[in-house]
Image (cartoon, grey):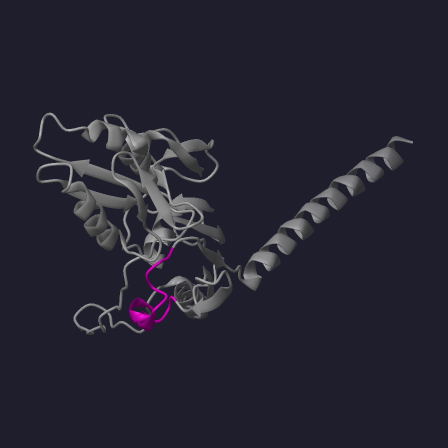
């Protein structure tokens, strides 16, 4: 009898582990599996994006402050808290947004807004076409303008509003600002505190917005290592990740309700018996 009980516990434990384990086709320790290289294409700037554009120069008399101060103009909102200590402008906002989580008050996001025509308007340098470029390509374009006015300019461009929504069976669902451009679905899941035990790892829904405004839905199996080399592994602006709950969650909720009702019925029965005897 004791052996049967132990065997049953082992079977139940293995079954539970199989449901929540990632990348199950990767061998255990002592064996290696070479995974294909994951294809990555840099993010493309679109109208409505907010960018941190920073120019530095070794000319002490330059008007760099005028250009860089444009990053402090509020360009949008986010669900994260205030800037990190010691940081300023869009860089401080970016650090805070990366550390922020769901449920916090909205704060202004600093940066330069890409207008509906796909341009950014910069002091001194004028209007520069941004949409359709990567941040590296836009850096080159701004450099070609800045070199006309400043000595040895160094230009950096970063996204401030690279946001992803993750909802469903995660510990901290909400909207997250990704700190770097090359962020993966596993990074987003980690920021959201991982999937709960009820989350379907084999059927994660990713909804991605296309350039023409339409959306495409993808299903990802996090139990298979092939997801690490899929085209959907790296995230894009405004991606939505939904973790579907298992049937076990509804069963657990039903069991909790049954337990509650049973307890209520038992208490009611005791009260009826007590009232009957009291008479």
Residue 153, percent from left and from top: 13, 40
Of the pair 9 and 245, the residue shown nearer to us: 245
- Which image quarter is the C terminus in? top right
Residue 228, percent from left and from top: 30, 67
Q: Residue at x 49, y 66 (%)?
A: 217
Residue 133 seen in render:
yes
Of the pair 47 and 277, the residue shown nearer to us: 47
In the image, taking residue 186 as reference, residue 263 lies left or right, namely right
Q: Residue at x 84, y 39 (%)?
A: 272
Q: Residue at x 32, y 61 (%)?
A: 234
Asked where in the image residue 267 lies, by quadrant, the reply is top right
Q: How many marks?
A: 0
Q: Residue at x 67, y 50 (%)?
A: 257
Residue 84, percent from left and from top: 29, 29
Residue 197 seen in render:
no
In the image, taking residue 29 as reference, residue 83 lies left or right, namely right
- Report the magenta residues as a range: 222-236
Asked where in the image residue 9 lies, by quadrant, the reply is bottom left
Of the pair 234 and 138, the residue shown nearer to us: 138
Question: What secondary structure do most residues of the magenta stretch adopt?
Answer: loop
């Amino acid at each position: 009898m004791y052996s049967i009980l132990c065997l049953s516990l082992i079977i139940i434990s293995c079954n539970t582990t199989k449901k929540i384990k990632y990348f199950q086709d990767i061998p255990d320790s002592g064996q290696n599996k070479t995974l294909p290289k994951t294809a990555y294409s840099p993010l493309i700037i679109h109208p409505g994006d907010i960018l941190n554009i920073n120019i530095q120069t070794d000319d002490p008399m330059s008007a760099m402050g005028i250009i860089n101060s444009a990053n402090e103009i509020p360009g949008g909102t986010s669900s994260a808290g205030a800037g990190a200590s010691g940081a300023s402008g869009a860089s401080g906002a970016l650090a805070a947004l990366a550390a922020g989580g769901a449920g916090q008050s909205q704060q202004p996001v600093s940066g330069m807004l890409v207008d509906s025509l796909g341009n950014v308007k910069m002091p001194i340098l004028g209007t520069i076409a941004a949409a359709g470029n990567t941040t590296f390509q836009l850096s080159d374009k701004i450099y070609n303008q800045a070199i006309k006015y400043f000595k040895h300019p160094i230009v950096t461009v970063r996204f401030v509003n690279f946001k992803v929504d993750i909802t469903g069976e995660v510990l901290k669902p909400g909207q997250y600002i990704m700190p770097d451009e090359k962020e993966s679905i596993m990074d987003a899941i980690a920021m959201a505190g991982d999937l709960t035990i009820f989350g379907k790892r084999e059927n994660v829904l990713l909804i991605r917005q296309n350039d023409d405004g339409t959306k495409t839905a993808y299903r990802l199996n996090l139990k298979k290592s092939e997801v690490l080399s899929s085209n959907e592994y790296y995230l894009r602006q405004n991606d939505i990740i939904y973790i579907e709950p298992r049937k076990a969650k509804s069963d657990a909720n039903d069991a909790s309700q049954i337990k509650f009702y049973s307890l209520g019925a038992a208490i009611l029965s005791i009260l009826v018996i007590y009232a009957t005897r009291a008479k």
